[in-house]
Image: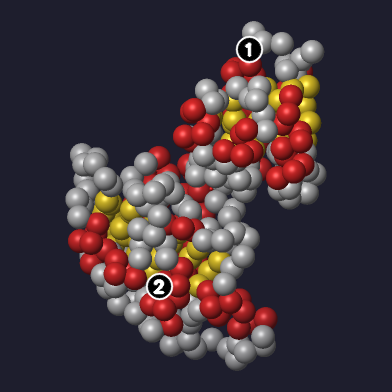
Amino acid sequence: MPPHVVVTQPLVGDAIDRLRHAGLDVTVVSEHGPPSRDELCHALHDASALVCLLSDVIDADVLACGPGLRVVSTVAVGVDNIDLDAARARGIEVRNTPGVLDAATADLAMALLLAVARGVVSGMDAIRRGEWTGFGLATGLGRDLAGMRLGLVGFGRIAQRVAARATAFDMRLQHHARHDTGAAGFVADLDELLRTSDALSLHVPLTSATRGLLDARRLAHLPDGAIVINTARGAVLDERALVAALVAGHLGGAGLDVFEDEPNVSASLLAAPNVVLTPHIGSATIETRSAMSSMAVDSVIDALAGSG
Ligand code: GLV
């Protein structure tokens, strides 16, 4: 019997074919959206490997459904949806897809920053509503990226790609990370970084240390009119505190690709001034999602090599 690979949802490109060509028996559990826990649990009973997405909750109970599981491979860089301790305790290897999505995610962070700073979406909404009455010198005034101080929270691969792009836009760069990066612009104290950033972009994984990192107290440090960009994980930022700061006119805008309770977006966030919201598409380009899918299945092929 060839090893059974359970894939929670369809992948991009030729990834499923790669698994089959490697002689593995493949089940895609749900063609549309995340499978139910029961469906997933049932599929896992004889599985050697699981390929999941970041929207699949892979907790201890789900892992227990697959007594033969040897590897869980997520088509994502973030692993916050997987109970890593439970996986470790069961001797299950966890793989992710770092490296291949850095440029796409950095592009989206810049797209959100530009869209917020220049009122791209609010401008289009005004045209759609028929409210644009013609060119006006003081109409639609945004902010220059050039000269703006951009604070990066986290300085991993994606943040560094954002830094490269922001440098090309003549922004002034600084970053905070838990450990001294040795790179120019390192600020050891997060509160200090916040006090001196006109725009902030979040690039930390969601862990117990970063959950709620940008809370009301920290957001209050940002200068008036500052812009917040989040392409990391929703729960790193306290959404209610963000909305309160936007409504109060303290913050100038926000660009969010990730949310605390995906796919639910609160009514207050939808109604908040100068927000640009995208549906968790940081890595969503054909090239990048194909590369992520290939990397995730190759990890499975690699981990199961020799078995069967
Ligand atoms: C996207 O959010 C990822 O973790 O890959």
Give percent across and percent down for residue 225. 34, 76
* x 59%, y 18%: residue: 303
Quarter placement of the C terminus: top right
Q: In the image shown, does 172 or 21 lie closer to the viewer?
A: 21
Estimate the x, y position of residue 226 in percent, counting from the top left: 34, 71
Q: Along the polypeptide, which appears first: circle 2 or circle 1?
A: 2
Query: Is the C-beta of the residue carrying label 1 under 8 Å from the nearest atom of ligand 1?
Result: no
The answer to which quarter of the image holds residue 122 is bottom right
The percent coordinates of residue 164 (x first, y second) are: 37, 47
Q: What label does residue 241 carry, if any?
A: 2
Q: Amino acid at mark 1?
A: Ala
Q: Amino acid at mark 2?
A: Ala
Marks 2 and 1, how far apart in space?
Answer: 49 Å
Q: Is residue 287 visible?
A: no
Does residue 240 sit above or below 60 in this rendering? below
Say few, some or many: other residues with alpha carbon within 10 Å of mark 2 (under 14 / 14 to 19 / 20 or more). some
